Image (spheres, grey):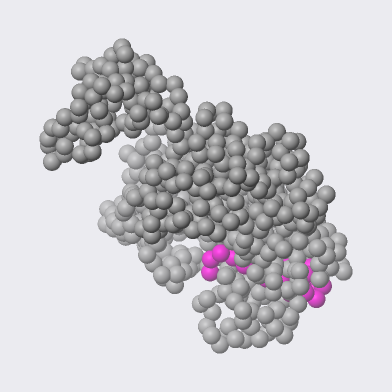
Amino acid sequence: MASLYRTKIQALKGVGERRAELFRKLGVTSVGALLRLYPRAYEDLSHPCGVRGASPGLPCAVRARVLNAPAATRARGGMTLYRAQADDGRNVFTLTFFNNPYIPRLLRAGESYVFYGRVTANFLGYGMAAPEFFPADSCPPIRPVYPQTQGLSSRVIASAVREALGLLPETVRDPLPPELLERYSLCGLRCALENIHFPASMKAAERARGRLIFEELLVLSLGLSLLRRKNGETSGFPLKRDCSGEFLSLLPFRPTRAQARAIREGIGDMMSGRRMARLVQGDVGSGKTAVAAALCHSAVKNGLQAALMAPTEILARQHAESLKKLLEPAGVTVALLTGSVPPARKRAVLAALEQGKIGLLVGTHALLSKKVKFRRLGLVVTDEQHRFGVAQRAALSAKGDRPHMLVMSATPIPRTLALMIYGDLDLSVLDELPPGRRKVLTYSIPSGKRPRAFAFLREKLAQGQQGYIVCPAIGEGQSDLAGVTEYTRKLRTRWLPGCSVAALHGRMKPKEKNAVMEAFAAGKIGVLVSTTVVEVGIDVPNATVMLIENAERYGLSQLHQLRGRVGRGPHQSYCILISDAQNKEALARLDIMRRTSDGFRIADEDLKLRGPGDFFGSRQHGLPALKIADMTADMGTLSRAREAAARILKDDPDLSQPAYRRLRAEVRQLFAHTEIS
C-alpha cells in the first residue's frame, strides 16, 4: 500500500491530466489515496423486483426484457426522448431516457437487463425514467456510489478503483498485526479494500466497513494518546504557589461552583510538575473567561507570561478590555496585539513582551507571527477552540518551553464525544450559569406575523436597546451580499423606517466588518443585519432581540449559539425564530429551542435529530478529517479502538516494534500537520 501512495493517479488506465485534476478535487492524487476513497452508499441490485412490487418513490432494481429498440421522439424545448417497452415477466412498462443518443446502441431488443431507478405508476401504466441499467448476466450484486464532483461520475470512479485494486500486490502489508485481527474478529486489509468497493453482498460490505472503521479510529486513538503524552510531559514552568484566592477576591461577583472547580483543576495541573493541557467547555455565558483569567493571574504571579488567542479581532479586543479591568488592579500588565494595531504601538508591545514587561498578551492569529517573542511564556490560552486547528495551538505553544495550555469552547458537546474529539486534553465542564443571568425568552412564528415582530423590535429600539437580525443567503448560487442588501433596504424603507440599521456580509473587508461591529458595540447602530452574524460573537449587553429568518435552515447548536448573542445585560432578552417550515425535523428543532436553553441538552437533541450526520462540521473541531468512521454512529467501535490503543501503547509506547511500524506510519500520515514524533 505504501508504494501505491507514491504512484500517481495518472498511472491508471483512462486517467489523464484532465481527469486527474477532477480527482484532485476529491482529495485523491495517488492510487493509494483512491483505494481509501470509500463509497458513500451502495445500490443493492441483488434482489430485483417487478414494477408492481416496487415501493413508491424509492429506487429499486427491476429485471426485465426489452421488447423493442428505443425510438426517438421530439419534445417541447428541443428535448429528444427515447422510449422503449420492457417486460418484467408479469407487467409491461415504459422506459424513458432524455437527450441520450447512445441509448439505441446500448439497449437491444430481446435482451434482459437489470434497471435501477424509481418506478412511477399512473393511468397509462408503469414506467421508469432515466434508470441506470446493466446486462442481466453481468450485473454486479452491489454497486458502489462514490462522492462525486462535476465531470466525474460514480461509474467512472468505480472503473478507476477496479484498475487500482489490480495494482495491489499479492500480499498486502496490513498495518494491523495478525493477533489484533484475531482478537477483534477483523478481516485483512486486502479483503476489506476489495469488499468495501465491490462487495458480493451487503454483509460483506458491512464486514469490510467494520474493519476499516476500526483501523481509522485506532489510528486516531493512538495519535491522540501520543499527543496527550506529549502534552503530559513535565512542564518547563511548574507553579510554585496558588494565587487563585487573591484573584477571586478581585472579582465583583461570586464564582459558580463549576467555575471554582475548573480553576482548582487548572491550578492543580500547573502545580503538579506536568504540563497542563485542559479544555474548559461551557455554554454561552457560563464564565469561561473568568476561569482563564484566574489561571493567567496565577501564572503571572509566579513570574511567567501568558498568551490568549481569539479567532476575531473584535473578540480579542473585548477580552483585552475585560482582562485589563480584572487583572491590572492586581499588578498584571495586559496588552493587545492584532493586525490593526498601529506599527509604532506594535513595536512597543513586541519590545516590552520580549523584555518580560507584559504579563498577558491578548491577540488574534497575529500572535503566531515570528516577530512575537516571549521572555518566559508559561501559559497559552485559545478561545473558541473549534476555530483553531491542533497545529495552530502547537505553533503558539512552540514560543515557550512546554508551556501550560488551556483551550476554551462555547460549543456544547455530549461528554462522551468531547472526551474523544478533544482526546489529547483533560476536560473541565462549566455546567451552570452565573446567578442573575436571565433566560432568553424564545418564540417561533410564521412569516405572516413578521410585521408584529418588527413592531416589537421597534418598541425595544425606542427604549434604547438593540437587536440582531440573521437572514440566510437566499439560495444556491446567490451571494449573501444580494440577500442582505435587499433585506436591509426593506428594513430601512418599509419595516423599520427611521431606525439605525447596518449590514454585515461576506464581501466586506475585515476592516469594514470590524468598523460595523464596533459601531454596534458602541450603541451607534440599532439593528445589525447579517447572514453570518458571528457565533463567536461580540459581547453587547444592550442587545436584547435576536430575530432569525428562515430558522429551519440552521442546526440546533447553531441556533443556540446565535441566541447566546443576547441576554448578556440587565434587560430581559428575546429570540424570535421566523419559519414556515412544515417538515417534522424542522418543527422538532424549533420546539426544542422554545422549550430549553440548556446547551448540553440541545447538543444531545441535535445529535439525536441529525443522527450520524456531520454534527461537528467538516473539520471535526480541528481534528484530522476521517474518511469512513463517524464520531456519532460508531461509538461502540470507538470504545474497542481506544481499548486496543491503550493495550498497544502499554506494550510499545513508541510504536517502534516491527509489528507496529506500519501503524506508526498511518498515525504520522493522519496527523501530518501536528507535532507527533
* Residue in the foreground of this view, choosing between 284 and 436: 284
Q: Quadrant of residue 204?
A: top right
- Span shown in magenta: 296-313
Left or right of residue 81: residue 344: right
Q: Is residue 287 visible?
A: no
* 41 shown above or below 660: above
Q: Position of residue 365 (x, y in %)?
A: 57, 70
Q: Quadrant of residue 182?
A: top right
Q: Position of residue 658 (x, y in %)?
A: 76, 53
* 441 shown above or below 42: below
Task: Quadrant for the C terminus, please.
Answer: bottom right
Left or right of residue 180: residue 463: left
Q: Position of residue 74 (x, y in %)?
A: 12, 35
- Which residue is at a point 57% across and 84% down the rendered structure image? 345
- Which residue is at a point 40% across and 58% down the rendered structure image? 21
Q: From this viewpoint, which residue is outermost toward the front?
A: 170
Q: Quadrant of residue 509?
A: bottom left
* 215 shown above or below 59: below
Left or right of residue 505: residue 422: right
Q: Position of residue 186 (x, y in %)?
A: 67, 36
- Which residue is at a point 80% across and 63% down the rendered structure image? 233
